[in-house]
Image: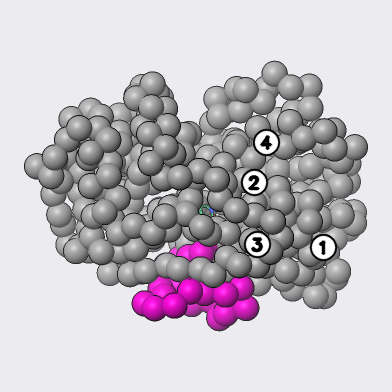
Amino acid sequence: MHKVLVTGGAGFIGSHLVDRLIQTDEIGQVTVLDSLTYAGDQRNLVAAMDSPKLQFVEGDIRDTDLVGDLMPSHSAVVHLAAESHVDRSLRDVGNSVSTNVMGTQTLLDAAMRCGVQKFVHVSTDEVYGPMPTGSAREGDPLRPTVPYAASKAASDLMATSYFVSFGVPVCITRSSNNYGPRQHPEKLIPLFLRKLLTGEPVTVHGHGQHLRNWLHVEDNCRAIELVLRRGIPGQIYNIGGGTDLTTLELTGRLLRIVGMDWDSVTTVADRTANDIRYSMDWSKIAELGFQPRCDLASGLAETVHWYRGNVDRWPVAEATGTLADGAELTAVGA
Ligand code: NAD
């Protein structure tokens, strides 16, 4: 029976992945390693906590001793722990680099020492940078424009180097923008929903024509599990297949679902770095057997239902995208 270490398992995508993995017969134990930053929440694991397969360890992926003690009893790692928000990376570059690059390296070192059978490193389409036309393939150059994306790109390169130099069986997944229940309200969809559901206006940055591919979190987790089982070491897999929408198109959809109109929308100047378009070719993961299943209309309806039922989950400041010093998060990218 496999034992899988999931870093960042108390976060948005990680908790959905844990829910999936503990239902898998061949997996005998799922260990979550998570330091419970502002983005991590054990309530995300409430369903999984009922399973004897779940072990939760509160700790930091940069803690060499802890990671070194934990890793040897596991046959596989799925690494999701990260500072995942673009705006916060603009305000504290060092924290993104420390967690996303140094943390990944600490895990790779331990994986190398104890010979894990698979190390899935979870990354993002943002590493390719803006794609004014066409779609990025896995071997394309990385041209990140913001510190978050640059730190993820650096961690991808570090992971690849551990495969080439030391034979660590690394696979990398790069997915488009995820949405669904439990996402922290600093991200665009929950930020807008939380504001609209409490009668506050939402703010669109610039012309609102920034294009993103919106993929339901369950679809991404199915693809990550597929790569865990069948991904070829050393390979990168783009995970797309969601719905392409500009920020204005997405805003229109959210307004319709909650029954509000454009009077609830204001615009402000764009930030300096805001990639105009992301697009990936995901034929490689499709060849491995992946097809997304969740259509945007039902996925968004389910997401709205969840946020309606969890209005009090985050403090008002966090729910409305305000940092401790009063600065407002812009949530343009993801
Ligand atoms: P999230 O911010 O919701 O969760 C991150 C989790 O990592 C949290 O539980 C946090 O407590 C934990 N964490 C942060 N720093 C840590 C540290 N030093 N040690 C241990 N735990 C730590 O993020 P998410 O949206 O679930 O994203 C998960 C992964 O997927 C990230 O690597 C992100 O780059 C990637 N990704 C996200 C998206 C998206 O749309 N959300 C898209 C593509 C890729």
Tag in front: 1 or 3: 3
Q: Which amino acid type is marked by label 3?
A: Ile
Q: Are marks 2 and 3 in contact (CB under 8 Å)?
A: no
- Spot occupied by residue 156 in the image (x, y as percentages of width and height): 64, 67
Q: Are marks 2 and 4 in contact (CB under 8 Å)?
A: yes
CA–CA distance between discs 2 and 1? 20 Å
> Which region of the structure is painted magenta?
124-147
From the viewer's side, name the closer residue of 91 and 205.
205
Q: Which amino acid type is marked by label 4?
A: Arg
- Spot occupied by residue 260 in the image (x, y as percentages of width and height): 17, 35
Image position of 222 with respect to 314: above or below: below
**Residue at (38% x, 41% y) in the render:** 297
- Spot occupied by residue 309 in the image (x, y as percentages of width and height): 38, 21
Q: What residue did someone put label 2 on?
A: 222
Disc 1: CA contacts within 10 A as few (<14), some (14-19) or many (>=20): many
- The verdict on residue 129 being magenta is yes
Disc 4: CA contacts within 10 A as few (<14), some (14-19) or many (>=20): some
Residue 162 appearing in the image? no
Q: What residue did someone put label 1 on?
A: 169
Give the side of residue 39 with respect to residue 197, left or right: right
Secondary structure, magenta segment, majority class: loop
CA–CA distance between discs 2 and 4? 8 Å
Residue 250 appearing in the image? yes
